Amino acid sequence: MPFPRTSGVLLHPTSLPSRFGIGDLGSEAYRFVEFLAESRQKIWQVLPLGPTGYGNSPYMCFSAMAGNPLLISPERLQNEGLLTEEDFGDLPEFPADKVDFEKVMEVKTPLLKKACENFKKETSPKFQQRFKSFCTSKAYWLDDYALFMALRDAHEGESWHQWEPELAERDPATLEKFEQELADEIIYQKFLQFEFFRQWSDIKRFANDRHIEIVGDIPIYVAHDSADVWAHPEYFCLDEETKEPALMAGVPPDYFSATGQLWGNPIYDWENLQKDNFKWWVERFQSLLDYVDIVRIDHFRGFEAYWAVERGEETAINGEWIKAPGEALFQVIRDKFGKLPVLAEDLGLITPEVEKLRDDFEFPGMKILHFAFGSGAGNPYLPFNYERNSVVYTGTHDNDTTVGWYDKLPEHEKQGLLAYIGCVSGEGIHWDLIRLALSSIANQAIIPLQDILGLGSEARMNIPSEGEGNWEWRYLPGTLTYKEIEALRKLTETFGRA
């Protein structure tokens, strides 16, 4: 569906300041929303909010529907009477400008477990009833997820396909036995989800009250080591004996990698999904639309045709395109929810068929200014080639920051860029590109916070195809000043996005 002319900021909550080593849903999240409101922004875009696994990527989570417990604010647990200031007495000194995920886990896990124990012992019957109501309303995914995480901990982090066959194949009697043995751990996992979504719902309400909408992110694929694949193996292409992916997801060689990107996620068994009228996908959209206002669909082109790589390949070069039933899927979802508040991440090798699927459902596509220069006037990412029903970014979480990108451009591309924007030097290039995005005809413009702050490559969020060292960037307390608010507000009002 087309959206009003607005603008906003891309920032994942892990990048917020916090004394607990990782951004969370505490006071700094509210300060960030106030920054958005004061600068007249209408959108806060986040990355997927799920519980991350290996590599800490929000695009490789243990569940497509659960929330990340590391985002729970201990200070808000303190406000609820579940923790005390004394519980924070031995906090180590964390890096201020990045997330040390391993250290954060070591510190936050005991705090979350203590909060859960206090919840079970000391909270009011009304509070307990809210917990029970949450568990009932989310049972369609929460029961499998809580048991999966409890079993995973009991197996010291082993992937589910390495568990004993009775568990891997979900023998009912074996599941019932472990549900009883792991009852306390299952309650703990459900408590974490209750608290995450309670805190997230509060921050979303705070944003909505200030006329700011949340753009959430739905990755097309899920991790193999996830509750989704364990609970619904019939919906994925798995090897019958080993339960490992028989076909792996990825993309062929592209802008980011000469050997393509081999993500390793299992490909969907779309035939079985369609037989069930896409029930799992409908539930997935339902779970996300409960907590965000707009959905960005990652790797949208995979709903028209997807790149499939056979097991055993070490790169994504040797794969093939296979048709997907995207039209049937989105029709079912639209029949269920009405016109969909969806943004389509339509980057990469886009065909007329992908464009038709996007346009038939009126999904705005994405325009990236970092891709616009160096290939002539026909480049679709140049602003004069945009359609109104689109969303423009300077760059995304997969790009370098604008300052870092500009520093690495070949000299002839720098000169072409400067000629386009009418500047003689690249000083303040981040604000030049922000201005270019906001002045374009695209209905929505979204700017990574790193570009508003004018940061270099040290603040890059992710380098695709590199498995480690990503997703760590955080901004420092006190960084968002009147200077940034005023500069962003003026451009937003000038170009009719307020």
Image: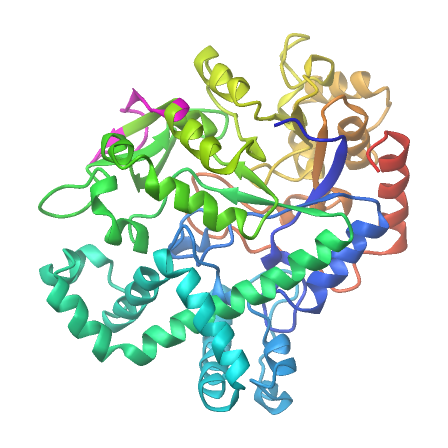
Q: Nearer the viewer, residue 206 or 57?
A: 206
Number of dots carrying numbers: 0
Q: Nearer the viewer, residue 407 or 397?
A: 397
Q: Quadrant of the N terminus?
A: top right
Measuring from the top left, give residue 496's x and y in whole percent: 86, 30
Q: Nearer the viewer, residue 128 or 416?
A: 128
Left or right of 49? Residue 489 is right
Residue 41 against residue 127 in the figure, above or below: above
Q: Quadrant of residue 226?
A: bottom left
Q: Which residues are magenta?
A: 309-327
Examine the structure image and report whether residue 91 is included in the region drawn in magenta: no
Q: Residue at x 46, y 81 (%)?
A: 116
Residue 424 against residue 7 in the figure, above or below: above
Measuring from the top left, give residue 238's x and y in whole percent: 19, 41
Residue 141 shows in this picture: yes
Q: Residue at x 49, y 88 (%)?
A: 118
Left or right of 70? Residue 409 is right
Q: Quadrant of residue 236?
A: top left
Residue 126 against residue 487 in the figure, above or below: below
Examine the structure image and report whether residue 315 is included in the region drawn in magenta: yes
Q: Residue at x 90, y 46 (%)?
A: 486
Q: Quadrant of the C terminus?
A: top right
Left or right of 210? Residue 229 is left
Q: Residue at x 42, y 46 (%)?
A: 284
Measuring from the top left, give residue 60's x and y in whole percent: 40, 49
